[in-house]
Image: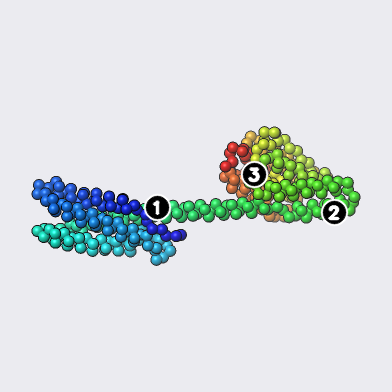
């Protein structure tokens, strides 16, 4: 982190020093043996000491620390400041003795040194607190920037994750359809083209309308029906109001892909998948008929969706598994709630 010099306005330094000088003369003003010359000299020396210690402490605290680990209070700098203050106050007390030769130097010296130590400590602690506060704010801002950059990078990575096996399986299905002379081959190619067109159009978006997401789902389902030939059923009970809400691109497609990937899909045991709304959630549900020797998930599905919702809304998706059905509940995202 770049070390910046403390910034205290010159007006603050000089005005506070003048006030301290005047305050130091208050006891003499209240004395019955008031001497204007003594009061003026005392005020002038105290004010001069305050000015010098302001600038010296600012210089000391602005210096870059020798080690990277910085203590809340640098005792070496505090000792240096007190030592410098004692020397300065001794010199000023000597000047005072030259001007006011009738004053006993011993008691006067003790008094001005104690006063100097107190003034110096107040200045040092105030400036140290100011410096620590500035550095803490700077560190917090830097951490927030790094965190924001990291989250943005992670989210961009999440948006780029498309299962390569889907393209591989789709091309194999297309090959089989072409070889068998299936009349749906042309429609299959068009749907596959539409699906990847949706992919290219949506990859740079954080959110899309749910109705657009359903177009992606329908294109994907057409391709899967051609592959599994009636091995699953799909029902959607989403209302027009819900279709106007928002969703991260390919959220529903990834959930349906997970359903097909992890469950038995066959004519003998058709897989039933449904999408409906429940209060403020979209629910994707399927009957559990898990494949034997189920392969471990690559994490592109539920983890991807959960991270995207967490990044965009700071909300969590709900996953419910009762050994009969598997449900994923997605919070509804309204346009006015997204910033």
Which is nearer the eye, 136 or 281?
Answer: 136
For mark 3, give the secondary structure: loop
Q: Can residue 241 be seen in this snapshot?
A: yes
Q: Is residue 287 visible?
A: no
Residue 124: horizontal and vertical position, in percent? 31, 56
Taking the image as shown, residue 244 lies to the left or right of residue 52, namely: right
- Residue located beneath label 2 in the image: 175
Q: Position of residue 279 (x, y in %)?
A: 63, 34
Residue closest to the far right: 181
Q: Quadrant of the rendered structure where residue 312 is?
A: top right
What residue sits 69% from the left and 37% below the top?
A: 243
Q: Which residue is mark 1?
A: 133
Lower position in the chain sequence, tag 2 or tag 1: 1
Q: Which residue is mark 3?
A: 207
Q: CA distance from mark 2 to mark 1?
A: 67 Å
- The reply to whether discs 2 and 3 touch (Cβ–Cβ < 8 Å) is no
Tell which tag, 2 or 3, sits nearer the viewer.
3
Q: Residue furthest front?
A: 11
């Amino acid at each position: 982190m770049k070390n910046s010099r403390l910034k205290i306005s010159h007006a603050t330094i000089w005005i506070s020093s003048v006030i301290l000088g005047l305050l130091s003369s208050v006891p003499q003003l209240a004395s019955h043996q008031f001497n204007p010359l003594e009061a003026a000299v005392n005020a002038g020396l105290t004010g001069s000491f305050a000015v010098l210690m302001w600038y010296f402490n600012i210089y000391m605290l602005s210096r870059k620390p020798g080690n990277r680990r910085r203590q809340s209070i640098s005792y070496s700098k505090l000792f240096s400041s007190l030592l410098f203050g004692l020397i300065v106050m001794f010199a000023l007390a000597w000047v005072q003795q030259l001007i006011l030769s009738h004053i006993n130097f011993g008691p006067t010296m003790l008094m001005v040194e104690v006063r100097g130590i107190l003034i110096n400590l107040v200045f040092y602690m105030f400036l140290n607190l100011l410096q620590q506060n500035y550095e803490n704010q700077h560190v917090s801002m830097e951490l927030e920037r790094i965190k924001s950059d990291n989250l943005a990078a992670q989210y961009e990575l999440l948006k780029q994750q498309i299962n390569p096996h889907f393209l591989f399986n789709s091309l194999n299905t297309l090959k089989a359809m072409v070889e068998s002379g299936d009349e749906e081959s042309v429609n299959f190619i068009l749907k596959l083209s539409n699906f990847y067109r949706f992919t290219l159009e949506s990859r740079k978006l954080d959110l899309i309308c749910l109705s657009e997401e359903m177009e992606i789902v329908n294109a994907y389902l057409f391709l899967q029906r051609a592959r599994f030939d009636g091995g699953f059923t799909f029902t959607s009970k989403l209302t027009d109001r819900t279709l106007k809400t928002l969703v991260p691109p390919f959220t529903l497609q990834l959930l349906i892909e997970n359903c097909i990937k992890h469950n038995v899909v066959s004519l003998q045991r058709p897989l039933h998948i449904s999408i409906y709304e429940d209060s403020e959630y979209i629910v994707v549900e399927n009957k559990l008929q898990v494949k034997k020797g189920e392969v471990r998930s690559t994490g592109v599905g539920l983890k991807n969706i959960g991270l995207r919702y967490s990044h965009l809304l700071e909300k969590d998706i709900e996953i419910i598994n009762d050994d009969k059905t598997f449900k994923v509940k997605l919070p509804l995202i309204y346009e006015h709630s997204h910033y």
